[in-house]
Image (cartoon, helix red, strand yellow):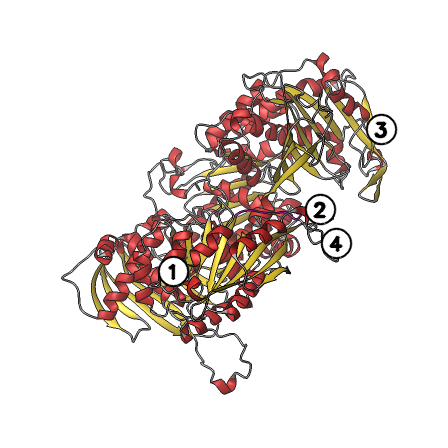
Amino acid sequence: MASRSAAQRELAVHRRLMEFGEAESLATPEWEAKGTDVETIEAELARLWGGPEVAPADGDGEARVTEKGLPHARASVLNLIVTVVDAEAAERVVQTMMSLGVRHPSRAIVLVADHESKGESLDARISTHCHVAPSMEDERICYEEVILTVRGEAAEHLSGVVAPLLIHDLPTFVWWPGDPPFAHPVFDQLVELGDRLVIDSADFGDLLGGMRRLANLRHRSGVGDLAWERLSIWQERIAQFFDAPRFRRYLPNLNRMVVRYAIPAHRPSPSERPDPDAPIHEAAAPMAQAVLLAGWLAARLEWRRNKTVEWLDGRGFRLRLEGRHEMVDLHIQPEATDSVTPGELTSVHLRAYGETGAAEFIIDRSSDEATVATNADGMTALLRQVMMESPRPAELLSAQLTANPKDPVYESALRAAVIFLAAARSGEPLSARNTQVVSAAQELGG
Amino acid sequence: MPPASTTVVPVLPDQVSGGDGVRKIANPLREGLRLERIPEPCTMVICGASGDLTTRKLGPALYNLMLGGFLPPEFSVVGFARRPMSDDDFRELLRQGIDQYSRNRPVKASVWKSFSQGIEYHAGEFHESGSYADLAKRLDRIDRDRGTSGNRLFYLAVPPVLAPEIVKQLGAAGLADTGEERGDAKRGWVRVIVEKPFGFDIGSARKLNREIGEVFKESQIYRIDHYLGKETVQNLAVFRFGNGLFEPIWNRRYIDSVQITVAETVGVEGRGEFYDQTGALRDIVQNHALQLMTMFAMEPPVEFMASDLRDEKLKVLRAVKPMTVADVADNTVRGQYVSGWVEGHKVHAYRDEPEVDPESQTETFVALKLGIDSWRWAGVPFYLRTGKAMPTRVTEIAVQFRRAPLALFARAGAPQIDPNILAVRIQPDEGILLRFGAKVPGQGLQIRSVNMDFRYGSSFAVDSPDAYETLLLDAMIGDPSLFTRADEVERAWEILDPILRAWPEGKGGPLHFYGAGTWGPPAADELLERDQRAWRRL
């Protein structure tokens, strides 16, 4: 399951995340053992929180107790399971989580499954991570992290290894960085164990295939997509256009939507990159956000697919959709730029016809700012400059960790995105099968 | 973009009755969005725009809202004050304020550029009708040019004495009329924000309410008390009504007494003149402390929305047992600090502060005992205390539960167990603490009280927005939950009226003195000792 390219993508994810690292964090190694068993690990975890008398503080005498003599605050909020492909990747998850200042998990379990090894064995390493809480300078919030390397046949039964180590009665999140192995039984096991699966569809090796799997995932848990989370500021800005009732009437009359997303302007050759650790700005599926945004608007406004006009070599497409009152031209286009992270959106242009002529609603982004413009009602164009910072990964992940398990708005956007991608790829004019986007889920499911 | 940490359903602009009375179609794109709410386009007129509040609080709050994209592009600001100034001068004044006081600094040039295009300055005298006629024309022009749809928010950032005059003039110039009243679909809503203090006593509060009420309807009036941040109100409501565990014991049967503490370490900090005329009772008890008490003691509202919430809060205030002037000496203690040490710094006596009368009788500390005559609270004393130059800065509500009915462990040699305490801490770090007895491990039976401590900060690690940002946005959206209604204000003054009358006549007990850096005069301790209780040590 650890193909070379998947591992590379996973590496890229962590490098990307690391760049945004912000929190000061202290990691204290607590315990390590090779060839151990789940029961021993459980006992070690229990000992960690035994308090100052049972587990004396080490060297500096303040590892477990604050200046006021209180134990470091333990915030029991959730369990987080992270799956990675190898020990190196596990190390990166640890670094990433520290630099992210992920203050949410009460217990993070990083799983390294090594299917190839002969013979079963279980290695474990426990550390505690402490963060200084905002506005409480003498107080640290700690969580513990367990890195488990599972070898041999046991690697096929990961849920049995993890389940006893979770804190009871807390929601459990499964974060699968990189390209998740949807077809693998271990994937199903772990997803079943969790209340919510967190992935990033921009990391899918096969965007259509991955999104289709995601849309068909049938289990009690919800799906959190970091690519979707990155769109929330765009959705907010777009919704804002139509908060004013006089502009809202243009909404059913939209006839053109152009979404552009960033791709690298300049691809450095290996010789130009002497530092192998330099961050790789590359998402496996940079089109993910753009398609999801189009899917969102289409699902909200109940646009129907009409026909495919153009398929741009896997990097964009043009579809003709049937809106409420107008035919809608949907364009997804790549834009070569270095000022915006690849995969992020660079602009959204909407156009509509109203009683007083054409109206345009435009968001143009460059680096961390955007120009938001409304040109309608024959009025002077309303322009404003707003911040459009990409949310830091810590915020993305935190938002996912506090979100409601089920998000019907995401689910309908995802289904629409799948239909767009499938239609665009097949390239056939499908006007005969004029399927309403929102209700097309059944068609997909079958 | 903080992750949503509350379960409160946001009020969308669509659900607010617009001034035009036309039912608006909801924005389908809003469905399921997690971000905050955005108000309709509007113009905010700041009366008293050259003052301190504008540069320190309002400017930075508006800028941060714009920066976060919470304001629509049409949003416009008109500064209105006497001082002659050009639009550019006023923009520069705001910009300097933002540079100095904003939580996001320095000013982002590009964001400021687009924001400042919507900022104008209107020089005029507050008592001249001509200034308002000109203002009306200016606002009409802004509506046309910028599409602010006739929606207006007037912010009275002026000393309280000026408020009635400005309100009267606004009314005379037709600026308080909504579109509905004028049969003019182009006119939107009109709201006015009034700063505290709301009056000086019951008489002046009623007069102020009447004067504002002659021009604006109650639904248009937003009385701002920034002390009550949104989080506190919602946290307390969720704690009480979102859990099945606490509400059943939230009554006289299980609760012995309640203590509310609002302690500040600072002295009067350059506000000597204002404070010397005001005192702790008017400054803190009338609004902040009584509001905390109402939120703690109120019945569950039918719905978590402004009108229900405020009805329930008012019921609590109405049930507060009226004091007679004769009761005042028994149930109140007032104090004034003399020199001492706070947090390692020497603090001068209150009377030595600048602009304070050297023989001032103004109280800097108050302790009160109140009762609420309701089925839920009859017989449960509510002890309130607030003071300046206290040892620590803390705001909390602490519930002391009744003791266990039997001293079951006394025979085994364990002494009387301390009662259980549940403390809702509001400042400095919001949280909840539960204190209960536990057996000390080992042979024999020793019981010790232990604390179970929950902090919002350590569980959610999310920063709350500045109070002014939240409140300005609420006013623009039309959500008055966090603003005080006229009847609440008046009832709070009624409760304090006997005290305000007794003290100057010397009937309410003497003014005690306490050293800065102590928890008030010994008389405050005696107030509780008479009931066999003691203040919590904080």
Q: Which residue is mark 2?
A: A53
Mark 3 vs mark 1: give the one in front: 1
Q: Secondary structure at mark 2?
A: helix
Q: Are marks 2 and 1 in contact (CB under 8 Å)?
A: no
Residue at 80% x, 30% y is: B336
Image spot of residue A324 (x, y percent): 23, 53
Q: Which residue is mark 1?
A: A187
- What kind of residue is marked 3? Glu
Q: Chain of mark 3?
A: B
Q: Kindly report the distance in space between the C-alpha atoms of the residues bearing marks 3 and 2.
A: 56 Å
* A10 or A310: nearer the viewer: A10
Marker disc for residue B359: 3
- Mark 4 / mark 2, whichever is N-terminal: 2
Image spot of residue A234 (x, y percent): 41, 58
Residue at 46% x, 33% y is: B304
Q: Kindly report the distance in space between the C-alpha atoms of the residues bearing marks 4 and 3.
A: 53 Å
Task: Answer few, some or many: residues within 10 Å of disc 4's Cα (few below 14, many 20 plus, some between 14 and 19).
Answer: few
Residue at 47% x, 55% y is: A162
Task: Answer few, some or many: residues within 10 Å of disc 1's Cα (few below 14, many 20 plus, some between 14 and 19).
Answer: some
Marker disc for residue A61: 4
